[in-house]
Amino acid sequence: MIDTHGHYDDKAFDEDREEVLSDLAAHGVCQVVNSGSSLDSCKRTVELMEKYSFVYGSLGIHPCDTAELTEEDMDWLARQSRAEKCVAIGEIGLDYYWNEPERETQRKWFARQLRLAQEVGLPVVIHSRDAAQDTVELMRAEHAEKSGGIIHCYSYSRELARSFLDMGFYIGVGGVVTFKNGRKLKETVEYLPMDRILLETDCPYLSPVPNRGKRNDSRNLKYVVAQIAQIKGLTEEEVERITTENALRLYPKLSQI
């Protein structure tokens, strides 16, 4: 299995990061994409990529961390994104659940990072919360289909998923699909073609049932796999194989080890 979105740079792993990462292979997790969300977390992601052979990275600024961004920061991101093990620009996007920074600031830097991805020739990892219409409109305006990528931690309807699929995007599915109140995501997974589904944890957040409420890590992917298998009428082995093939198709650098 490949965890396409984790945050092992998070302070939640400060006490046992080495132990957790060293144990992933024993649980069937062969590779992890660590996702940057601020300038500091991007720097820590670069360090993780350099230290662990199986950790790759996506580098970008989460909408909630865009208030102080500058063009110099974009230049730094561009340079770092050319690293051998950087596979995407992200996570970037819009988050209207929070009131800060103001929406215009979020939109400005989302659009700028969509353009950055095209400049450096990488796909994008998109975070979108309570901002469906603006997300789709900005993606279309900036021709995000040229980069492709993932809609991370998908939280919208199955109907809206069609818009993202039409732009060539994959849908990231994590622990929410196991929640009792995760009906919308279950319906979306039922609708999605299997060749557009990617596994993710968003760890240390969104731990799946039966570990909901606890710190999440990639060893919990098996619960996500089991739920997808049940919804799609497939074996767990089939889900693991197909989602791994999907990840390698989007991120060909992962197949080089």
Image (cartoon, grey):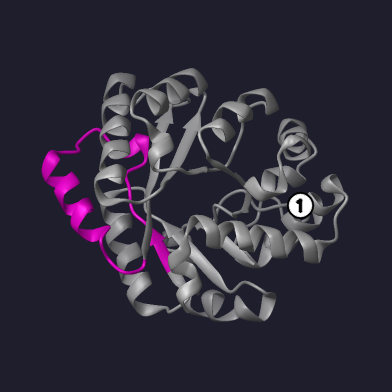
In the depicted structure, whether residue 138 falls above or below residue 149: above
Q: Nearer the viewer, residue 83 or 51?
A: 83
Q: Residues within 10 Å of mark 1 (few under 14, many from 20)?
A: some
Q: Where does residue 137 sit, x and y in percent of width and height?
A: 42, 20
Secondary structure of the residue carrying tag 1 is loop
Count of numbered circles in the view:
1
In the depicted structure, whether residue 238 falls above or below residue 137: below
Q: Is residue 92 magenta?
A: no
Q: Nearer the viewer, residue 229 or 96?
A: 229
Q: Where does residue 7 sit, x and y in percent of width and height?
A: 46, 58
Q: Does 86 sit left or right of 171 as displayed? A: left
Q: Where does residue 97 sit, x and y in percent of width and height?
A: 48, 25
Question: In the rendered image, which quarter is residue 187 located in?
Answer: top right
Residue at image coords 27%, 55%: 40
Q: What's the amino acid at mark 1?
A: Val
Residue segment shown in magenta: 56-85
Residue 96 visible in the shown view: no
Read off the residue under disc 1.
Answer: 209
